[in-house]
Structure formats: C-alpha cells, structure tokens
Amino acid sequence: MKAAVMYGPSDIRYEEVDAPKCEEDGFLIKVRAIGLCGSDIRNLTSDSANGHYPKVYGHEIVGEIVEVGSECDGAYCVGDNVYVYPGNPCMKCRWCRSGQQEMCTSGVSYTDRMGGFADLYSVTSHQIASHSVYKLDEGQDLVAATLAEPLSSVYACQDNIDVRYGDTVVIIGAGPIGCFHIQLARMRGATNIIMCELNETRLELSRRFGADHYVCSGKEDAVEKVMEYTNGEGADKVISATPTTFTQNQAIHMAKPHGTVVWFGGVPKGSMAEIDSNTVHYKGLWIYGHYGANSIQVEDSFHLALSPAFEAPKFITHVLPLSKINEGIGLTKSGEAIKVVLIPNEDAPDAAELLSWEDSHGWHGEES
Ligand SMILES: [Zn+2]
Ligand SMILES: [Zn+2]
C-alpha cells in the first residue's frame, strides 16, 4: 500500500510500505478521507519522533471497513463507513470513570502507532472498547466527517465554559480551530463575537463565518479594539487559540471582570509565559486551560460535524490526494487553506468522487 512516510523534519515521501494486518479482534479500514491537522503539521515539520523514523502520522480518520477479524465485535461489517477518534482511553481509571477520558493516563498514545496517512489503517479492539469508533449512516459525507476530531476539543471547550446567549466572545487566532470557535459560539447564542488574527490572509478567510468584528492584530492594537467593541468592559469569554504565550497574556487584558480566559492553543514545549498577574487578581479572572474532549463530547461533535447546521463546507477549503500532503502543509501554514482533507487510495475508482468534493459540496461564497 501507499503511505505518506516521514523521514525527518519536513521530509515526507509518498511511497510503498507494508500494509498493516487485520487483528483477530479488530478490523481493517481503507482510509477514504483524512484531515490534515495543525498538530500533524507540527509533528511532520519538527523532530517529533526524536530521530526514530520512518514514521506515519495522521489521526482525523474516516474509512470503509474492508476486513473484519474473526473475533471482532459483531457490530462491524465489511462495507461500513466509520470515523475513528484517535483517543484510546482505558475506561477504567479514575479519570475515565469520572467522565474525564481526555485525562486518562493509562491509554495508548495514538502517535505511538501507525497513523492514517496511508491506504489502510488497522483498528484495534481497544479502540472499539474505548468508544472511539463511530459508524456513519448510509450517504453521510465522508469528507465532512473528518472534521469531527478537530471539532471535538472546540466543542468540549465551549461546553465546559458554557458559551451561551448574550455572551461576548473573543477568539484569538483564525486557524481552523479559531473558525470552529466562531461557528460554534454563534450556534450557542453568543451575540458579540470578535476575531483577532495576525495573518491577513487567514483573517480574510475567516470572514465567511460572520463574526461581528474582525481585528487584524498585526495592524491594530487588539486589546484596544476589543475594549472599543465591548463598550470598554471587555469580553465574557476570551479564547487564545494560537501557539504563542503572547496571546495568552493578551487575553487577560481583553476579559471583563470575572470573565473567563481560555488557554486553548498548545505552545512550544517548555515555553514560559509572562503574565500580568495583578490584572488576573484584581479583575477576578478565571483562567481555564483546555485540552481534549470527554467521550460524550467526542460523540456529540461527530454528530455535529455531519449536521447541515454546522456547514462543514465552509471549513474544508482543499481536498487533495494524499500524495500532495506537502502541498497541503504549505497551504495550511500560509493561511490560504482553512482545512485540508487528504484522500488516500487516490487511484481507486471510488476516490474520484471524493477528489472532486469541492465542486460538488464545497462552499462557493453563498451567504448562510
Ligand atoms: Zn486533529
Ligand atoms: Zn483511563
């Protein structure tokens, strides 16, 4: 089979590799569509495996079952389309039992196994038992379903901080995650949504989600603009969705007294943030670090990603064959793409329909 194999930072080659085996108690899927995630890009362009290459990443997986092990759970059949969430919580530890599967310490990290940037992917019985596999209904959109994974942490965040009717929400960072945040905040009833972004191309692209105000933080003082758009009060909820500690501190100055600040975006390992702690103290702020999603939130976001109300086509700007993964990385890094979805098995007859997804399903600028 073919896979996008990493040999070192930014050295990714589309080549022939051994196919994974179908486990007795698991099943094998033909990967039909897979999202290219910011974390994949971080892993693929840095020495993420500490010299242990070759390596295959990819975790926003949607595929079709092509082989079922003899001991596998009878609920899965050849031909079923499934979405596979990458988390593998144990469902037994204290965190799992209290509904905080994202904090499970005894699960298997998905980056330790072969990922989905490949024609085939093996699903284990452990993934099935940990509620990480969801079946798509007949006719549901395989490309849109890849959004379920990146959406899950955004969904969980807004669920946990209870974004609701009347809220003023500031989102810093207009990457795919920031765009999910706008869309979801709107769906949950926020009435004043402010998007702040440094990169102009990215900011322009995010206008399709209809935030109330857009701030180009490269050109304007983002804190000042937020104050202006909130009558000098600050926002109820400020979400820093960038990979820098700079915006984590900026968020503190954008929040209103007793407001909530979310440190959503992960920053480079070992980064130390300089925080205006007196502002946190005197404004009585809540600082919430967000990561992941619990099992129920994972399930809810799978259904949300496929719901027409969520408007998946607005997010997926590029559908490319897996062999063009390097192009996908470039488009995402420059801000030209919101979300890139890759199609493995690109020469198979059934890939043609997915590769022309943008023509048939893509968003072409009509108002929602
Ligand atoms: Zn992801
Ligand atoms: Zn656990």
Image (cartoon, rainbow, N blue to C red):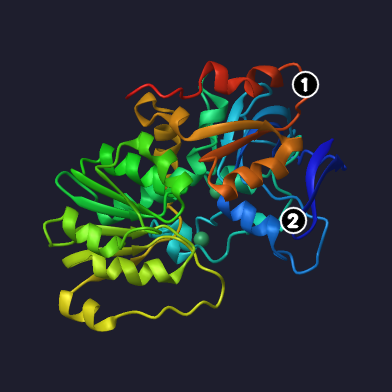
Where disc 1 sits, the SS reads loop
Instruction: Give residue 10's mark.
Output: 2
Q: Amino acid at mark 2?
A: Ser
Instruction: Give residue 348's mark.
Output: 1
Q: Are marks 2 and 1 in contact (CB under 8 Å)?
A: no
The answer to whether 107 appears left or right of 2 in the picture is left
Give residue 209's position: percent from left, percent from top: 35, 36
Q: Residues within 10 Å of mark 2 (few under 14, many from 20)?
A: some
Residue under the point 70% across and 21% down: 351
The answer to whether 103 appears left or right of 88 in the picture is left
The answer to whether one can see residue 86 in this image is no
| Residues at marks 2 and 1, CA–CA distance in whole angstroms | 27 Å
Give residue 263's position: percent from left, percent from top: 38, 65
> In front: 319, or 198?
198
The answer to whether one can see residue 26 in this image is yes
> In front: 271, or 310?
271
Ligand 1 within 8 A of label 2's CB? Answer: no
Residue under the point 55% across and 57% down: 90
Q: Amino acid at mark 1?
A: Ala
> In front: 182, or 34?
182
Q: First in sequence, mark 2 or 1: give its number.
A: 2
In the displayed structure, would residue 23 be above or below residue 350? below
Foreground disc of the pair 2, 1: 2
Where disc 2 sits, the SS reads loop
The quadrant of the rendering that contains the N terminus is: top right
The answer to whether 183 appears left or right of 54 in the picture is left
In the displayed structure, would residue 222 be above or below residue 269? above
The answer to whether 288 appears left or right of 203 in the picture is left
Give residue 154's position: percent from left, percent from top: 40, 49
